[in-house]
Image: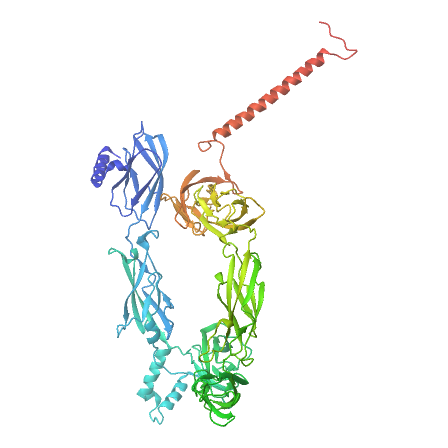
Amino acid sequence: MTPMVHLLLLASLLSVAAGVDLEEKKGPFVDVELDVPEGTPVPHPVHQFQVPADANNFRLSGEGLDTFKISKDGWLYLEKPLDWSQETHYAFNVEALADENVVKGLITVTINVLDINNNAPRFEQNLYTASIKERTAAGVPFVRASASDRDDPQTVNAQLLYSLVSQIPNNHNVPLFQIDPDTGDISTTKEGEEKLKAREGIQYARGEDESIDSLKAKFNEYCPAQEIPHEQNPFFTCVEKQEKRRRNLDPQEDPDYTLVIRVQDMKGASETALSGIARVNVVVQPNVWVNPGPITIKENLKGDYPRIIAKVQSNEPDAIYSLVQKERRLRFPFQITPNGEILLTEELDREEKEMYILVVFAKDNHDREVDPPMEIHVVVEDVNDNEPMCDMEETVLEIQENEPTGSLVGQLKAHDPDKEGTRNSQLTYTIISENPAVQSSFSIDESSGRIQALRLLQRKEQKVYNLDVRVSDSDFSTNCKVTVKVIDVNNELPLFEKSYYGNHSLTEDTEVGHTVLTIRATDADEPDTGSSYIMFNISKGNDGDVFAVETDGQGVGYVVVAKPLDFETYPTYNLQIDARNTEPLTKNLKYGSESSATLSVSVQDVDEAPQFSLDVLDVAVPENFTKGSVLLAVDAKDPEGKEIGFKMEGDSQGWLEINAATGEIRTKDNMDREKLETFEVTVTAFEKGNPEKSSERVVHVRLLDVNDNLPKLTETQSFICMQNLKPVIIKAEDLDSDPFSGPFNFTFSKKTANWKLKQIDDSSAELHLAKKPIKEGTHSVTIDVKDKAGMGVPQLFQVKVCNCTALGYCYMPPHGVDFKPQLGTTIGILAGILAFCVIVFIIAVKRSDKKNKNRQQPEDGDQSPMM
């Protein structure tokens, strides 16, 4: 580059960069990663390297040399506009030169091309064609209009929004179609499900010929006595033309509806969003697969069987029909014929089953469904085929003598097995006879069966009345028997055998259910009636409802312990027990003291063990519960008020301690849910003067998880072979549980063009090299791993890019710039060499000494040589 060209270029660069802080674009002569938006006007200054000493020029090598240039003063500039869709990043090397000699380098420059929204989204097709059947359920997609955008999919520039622009025709301004804004799936609306109709056409039965001759025959059926030949008859030719058109519908040429759809990028949220348009031609096809239900059939219907009750027709003329019942019962009186006729094979009984659910399948010869399964409800209509039934063989009722006219005697209960709420089960009650039949004594409500007295009844006149009541529905009737007993008026009081039953002593540990004593009372009214039936109840002195009276109604009562006794709460009880009848007393008669009795109960104190205030001791606390804080205050007291102490056992982790005097349980060490989530300790409360008197409670402790563990990479280094750039699998783990653990989110702490991350599952991701590396080396990538709650920290992951052996292991030659053994490794090697030398030296010295000794002590017979 000549000095003049250099000056002109520098002036151009400075003019382009006017208003830009050039200091931000300067940096040392080291590896650098830079971001440049696509479409940036050229020439554009990208970065200026500090010129190393003695350097007077620079040299680029690698990719993008026709796009990027560098001046002698270190300015890296853009000479051609960038296009993200063509290249997302560039990597090249820079060397500093003194004339043609390298004085510093090589350094690597990575250029990340930043995407701008300069590509409008486009549908895969300008025109889509689709068909849909009548009565297709709303929301079920029948065609998908997919679009794509050439902008960066990781940015909002490529996030698409689908919308429906117009529907043609739209006569009533009612949208019959809709499009999913995220997927482009097109379906019907609720209105479309109901209003979409196919074109009218001729219907053919299964296996029926659909030729022109068959069409002529059907035309003659509708239009008989036609003297004009079919070919010359304008009505027939019109029908023929329409039928051919219906059979050969072409959505592209003759659609029923045309939809105009739009796709926008940037999710349609910006006024600058770009868009694309497409059309969808829709043909509505007839749907003869119509549910004929619900089908109503009368029970016990007489006639010939099997009989046709309905018919279904598949949209596939050659479909094979099958019929099953949904409930899978043994009895299934239905069949289906090859042409879709549903047959009933026998009479139905509503009282046996009120409704059947039939499932009809239409399949092809390969047992594949050609229409969705159809559920048909068959309702069995009730007919009046059952007589009313009395609930009891004989209904026995009682009434006291001298009850006022109109008093309720009782109710006769009956039922009808026919369908409830219909005329078939509506009952009418009528008294048809009384015995004795001197005069009418009772009436009955026709609709409810309530029986009332029509006069004052005297027991001395008649003790028992027998009634015959007819119970009828609209067609049938039955007779029910009713017996009415006139019972003696309750004019006698129940009398206790004695008024005071004395004092009774019980220890406070007496078991519940223990009988204290037996009491007795008598009643002179008629036996086995409500007037003589005796109930006992404790009316006074039963504090805490500790006692109860059990009785058989025949005048004998048993006073029992109903709840545990406690001397410290109630040491004595003065009970009053009343005897009462179930029937009210006659007028002007009242219960007096003769119908009551008293007794006293003394509770004897025993030395009881301390008692806890709660039977269940459960506590749930966060695992980071503050050390030294009170976890739980155990409350216990000695019934006799004696001084008690507390102790605790079972704390295997040594996390807790208990205050022996107050029962407060505190944490004495930090707890860890990941080590132990639930545990139990046993707390004992004991009398200090008599430790054998003690009670135990188990304290259940559950530690609640907190987000105190960050997700960590299971491995922090790996390698990639330059010959086979397979991705590295990165895995993470978190000791916390949901919702403070997975799924994890893997992202780069800093955007990089050399690496890509792809999530595999909830706990792992793949780390890819974006392009083939230029040289070997170890690369450090900082990855953010966050848990479900968004907690995480950047973690360093080292990847060694290297040449590999045939077995796929990383091989690094033990020389050159890349081989840099650590200090510990170097010291170890030197120490080993030194030790080896010392051992060799010692062995050599020992062997030399041995040889000298052998020479100084010759064997017998040897002579020393003459000197």
Q: Which part of the image, by quadrant, shows the N terminus?
A: top left
Front in this rendered view, residue 155 or 500 = 500
Left or right, residue 233 beside residue 502: left
Q: Residue furthest top?
A: 867
83 w.r.t. 553: above or below: above
Residue 417 visible to the viewer: no
User: Could you say which quadrant of the image residue 769 lies in?
Assistant: top left
Front in this rendered view, residue 175 or 700 = 700
Left or right, residue 87 beside residue 656: left
Residue located 41% across and 86% down the image: 214
53 w.r.t. 778: above or below: above
Front in this rendered view, residue 612 or 654 = 612
611 w.r.t. 242: above or below: above
How many labels were placed on the picture?
A: 0
Residue 422: % across, % down: 43, 85
Q: Residue furthest right?
A: 861
Residue 226: % across, % down: 34, 93
Residue 746: % across, % down: 41, 48
Residue located 29% across and 34% down the image: 74
Front in this rendered view, residue 142 or 392 = 392
Residue 398: % across, % down: 50, 83
